[in-house]
Image: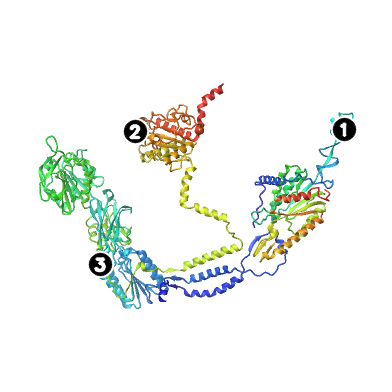
Amino acid sequence: MTVDAPAPAARGGGARAFARARHAEQISARLPPLLVAAERVAATVAQGVHGRRRVGQGDSFWQFRPFLPGDAIQRIDWRQSAKSDRTYVRETEWEAAQSVWIWRDASASMRWRSTDRLPEKVDRAEILALALASLLLRGGERVALLGHGMRPVSGRPMIEMLAEAVGRRGDAGAVAGLPAAEPLPRHGRVVLIGDFLSPLPDVQEAVARLATIPVTGHILQVLDPAEEALPFRGRIRFEGLEREGAALIGKVEGMRGDYQARLAAQREGLKAIAAAAGWSFGTHRTDASPESALLALYLALAPDRAGRAV
Amino acid sequence: MDGLIGSLPAIGFANPWLLAALVALPVLVWLLRVTPPAPKLLAFPAVRLLLDIPRRDETAARTPWWLLLLRILAAALVIIGLARPVLNAGGAGGGAGPLLIVVDDGWAAGQAWAQRVAALDTALDRADRAGRPVMLLATAPGDRGEPPRVTAAMPAQEMRERVAALRPRPWAPDRATARRAVEQLGRGAAGLSVLWVADGLSHGNGEDAEALGAALAALGPLTVLTPPPGALPVVLGTPASEPGRIVARVASLPAPAEQEIAVLARTADGRTLARATATLAPGATSLEIPVALPPELRNRLATLVVEGSANAAAVSLLDERWRRRPVGLIAGNAETADQPLLGELYYLDRALSPFTELRRGTVRELLARDIAVIVLSDVDTLTEAERGLLAAWVDAGGVLVRFAGPRLAARPDTLLPVTLRTGDRQLGGALSWQQPAALAPFPETSPFFGLTVPAEVRVTRQVLAEPSVALAQRTWARLADGTPLVTGEQRGRGALVLFHITANTEWSSLPLSGLFLQMLQRIVQLSTGVGAAAGDAVLAPYETLDGFGRLTPPPPFAAGLPAAQLAREAPSPRHPPGFYGPEAARVALNLGPSVGALRPLGAMPAGAELRTLDAEAAERDLRPLLLGLAVLLVLADLMISLWLRGLVRPVPAAARAGAAAAALMLLPSLALAQAQPMAMANETRLAYVVTGTGSVDDISRAGLVGLTDFVNRRSAANLADPVGVRPGQDELSFFPLLYWPMTPDQPNPDAAAVAALNDFMRQGGIIMLDTRDAGSGQGMNAGGEQQLRRLTRGLSIPALAPVPPDHVLARAFYLLTDFPGRYVGGQVWVQRDQDRANDSVSPVIIGGHDWAAAWAVDAQGRNPYATVPGGARQRLLAYRFGLNLVMYALTGNYKGDQVHVPVLLERLGQ
């Protein structure tokens, strides 16, 4: 019933972020580093670990070629040049990295749980976001949080910076249940984690806005088991957390079937929206383990999925 | 059928018309049925989905039937409660016309007054419900002496204030006047019924009570309430003063059964000095209860009270007559009379001055003022006129005590209880075969009977009485050979006493013994006391008794009266019983003596209904009970409603268990059991072994207090107050150091104590054994070594050695070379071998310097025990050793490094 007040970032934010980062790393430790294949060589793909089988910026040796006028003198490999009379330039393989923008829903509706034994939905969403970020960073990819106006970062130590950014939830009432419009580079990847209980046209609009950039992505719907099962009985006045209004239901147990049908319809709609944009869709319940959801995300983003040009 | 109804308590309603509201209950049922209960509130994120679902027809939720029943019940209780149901309605004082309530509020009503008030309240409640007017007649004269009269008839509510203002009066009721008032009323009254709350006694000649009863019965149906037999008053008459005790005279109604009566002797501020009991035989009406009081206490005696009484006649006020016994002293040879150890009056003065007022002077000077006892020591110069004055004074109650001597032996006069032979008899001495004589036990007729005769008292010379018939009877004390030593005679109200010896040690050693003092005290108590004032001076009331026998400031209408009249006066509204006169010389006016014999209330006229007070079942108003129940039900309804709405959740089982545990923790017994070890464990403190010898334990305690104070001032250690412990009974593990003085009277420690002490030492505690016999202490506590051997048998004490000069004990805080306590010169022993298991700390320290006495401080912070040989330096060193000892106990061998400092410095130098 009550909503946990968001922790002020200034007070204990660092310690909490560190703990979260540790937790996320523990969860992601069981999976191999995730390499998101760059679908296309584009501006979004910066220097990374994906060897491009061609000359470019990178760490791996690619070839020696004779010095040509116009090359910078600093690029001459003197050790190789000393073996013969010619002057050689050392060329490296062009290595590229994919950028992934992760978004998690921090709106008031996410700050809810049906019993004390379960985590709040927003907690689970943040853990998943960080675990995914950890996996990506270990894979050498670049990660950013969507909606925080930050540039993608790389390197494993950056996970703590991300955890701190995730911890800064801001005012729940001011946060929308869907990602806001943000100028993303083209051909990026987006992972959206939230409850997606908003009306389907709104979701459609948000996804389409991203898909036209174009950006591909994945939608993960996180729900509390009580939101799926509606296990209540008797006369109850349900009140929304985001001023959607209130529903007074005389006999909740009689409504259960109708509600579950309505929820299934919402999911079908989400799936259809995702498919139309070329995105993938998954669901997660907070009483399930976060590892299972992370595995599903991993499979959705990993390059080796059949038929996907990753 | 009738019997069945009679056995049920009757219930009446004060406002029966309110019950009509019960008709409205079905409407309430209908209203509650159509109003559904408030829904539970629940926050839910997916509420949009719920809003999207098309709404089906809902049946209105109904209030559960049991909740409905609860609310109906609460409403019904409120209605019935407002109708004011009363249990035990009806009873005495029934009837239709006005009710006349007659109350005995004389002195005897103080007993069971609360029951009387309750009976009056019940009667007023009934009259109130029946709407009957009430008249009141109190039979005792008022505070201003106004005679009893019947009030006008008024509603019962207004009468309540008057009834509440009634108090028992400390004087007798005036039933004759009350009867006349009733008879006057009778002419104009009709349809009356009468309730008489009587005190159960017939005051005066008894006819008045019967006449009043008859007059009341003539008015209408009469109900008489009398107190139960146990609540009837008991009266104290004038007590009698006897040597060593004071005899209370108790009068009561003929007792139906054996009754134990206790008399309390109290001081002016109400503290009880003594309590004496006696048993009143069935049918007896009087009883004498002797209260034994030593003379010192007797001077503080102010009142005698019957225990459990609450009336003014059961209090006997004792004024100065009972306490003041001025004694006049006249010596035959005034010049040497006060010479220390030899003078004639030296011993008398020392014996009498602690508990009497002593005066000196000539016979005329002494008799000019009130005086109880005159002592003439070997006086042979009385003139005829003086003898006449003294004889008259003795007749009036004075006690004349004469001591013999060479002058009286030569010239005896007539103012003596016996005729004396001229000359004296000498026992023992160079020219006599006889031995100095001892005293024989006192005969039963003697005022000295009961005093113990010390064997060492010897009489060497005395005067002899001429044999006569009356001599044996007048002998109060005699020698072992039968010769009279003290003779006495009652004369008039006083007495004449002759000691056949001198008042100094010239003729006997009696003045040196305690017996002399006791004999003089008994003689002084024989005398009548001296009143504070006499004559025509008017004495103002100082403190008076109220109706319950409590001393209070005098009421405004109490008037003073001449001292001479005081003895004859019976207490009245103008002169209530109490103390009169100035504070220093109060005179008592008592109610008890004027009451006379007690007689029960006479026969009541036929037709009168007689009841006892306690048989009257009190009415009970059921309104508070019912309304309280209704409130509880409403609260329950509120909780249930909140629960239905989900605002209150049932308390989980774990929390309930926690609450139960918390409640258990609050139980006082457990808390007490926990507190002791908790307090001990929270702070570090020193401890001493309780030896059972009070003085030694006091020294131990004072010593450790002084040491604790010193340690707290001089070091960073912060010790709490020391405690005494009993090994084997108390937990020792909280204490770093145990101080154990050796005393000859200590029992050997039992198995539990030995085990506890061994455990204590093994776990790092230090026991300091103090034989207190080093140096000069040998004389104070001889045999310390044997005690040490005896008391430490069974303790696992390691091999010991004298403290080496570089021992940690000598370096722990101060650098010391020897360890003085109260004494010096002894050897201090510690463990010989270094035991790594215990950080090389010696578990025992044995010495005999009586350190506790050196450390001891008293409440003023002074050191009560001198050091031997003495000096501030020795005391300071003793404290320093104590601080070293505490540091040694607290820090172990930490300061042991100090020992190695020279070596370390040397190494550094290289």
Give the number of the mark in front: 3 or 2. Answer: 2
Q: Which mark is residue A88?
A: 1
Placement of A207 over or under B632, stated as above or below:
above
Name which residue type carries label 2: Ala
Whichever of labels 3 and 2 marks the residue nearer the N terminus, that label is: 3
Relative image position of residue B632 (x, y in whole percent): 52, 64
| Residue A179 appears in the figure | no
Label 2 sits on a secondary structure element that is loop
Q: Nearer the viewer, residue A255 or B909?
A: A255
Placement of B420 over or under B45, stated as above or below:
above
Pointer 3 chain: B
Q: Locate residue B727: give its quadrant.
A: top left
Relative image position of residue A164 (x, y in whole percent): 70, 46
Label 3 sits on a secondary structure element that is loop
Relative image position of residue A47 (x, y in whole percent): 81, 42
| Marks 3/1 same chain | no
Q: Locate residue B276: give its quadrant.
A: bottom left
The residue tagged 2 is B782
Name which residue type carries label 1: Tyr
Relative image position of residue A112 (x, y in whole percent): 67, 56
Residue at point 50% right, 66% down?
A: B629
Q: Which mark is residue B204?
A: 3
User: How many other residues sit within 10 Å of disc 2, few (<14), some (14-19) or many (≥20)?
Assistant: some
User: How many other residues sit within 10 Å of disc 3, few (<14), some (14-19) or many (≥20)?
Assistant: some
Pointer 2 chain: B
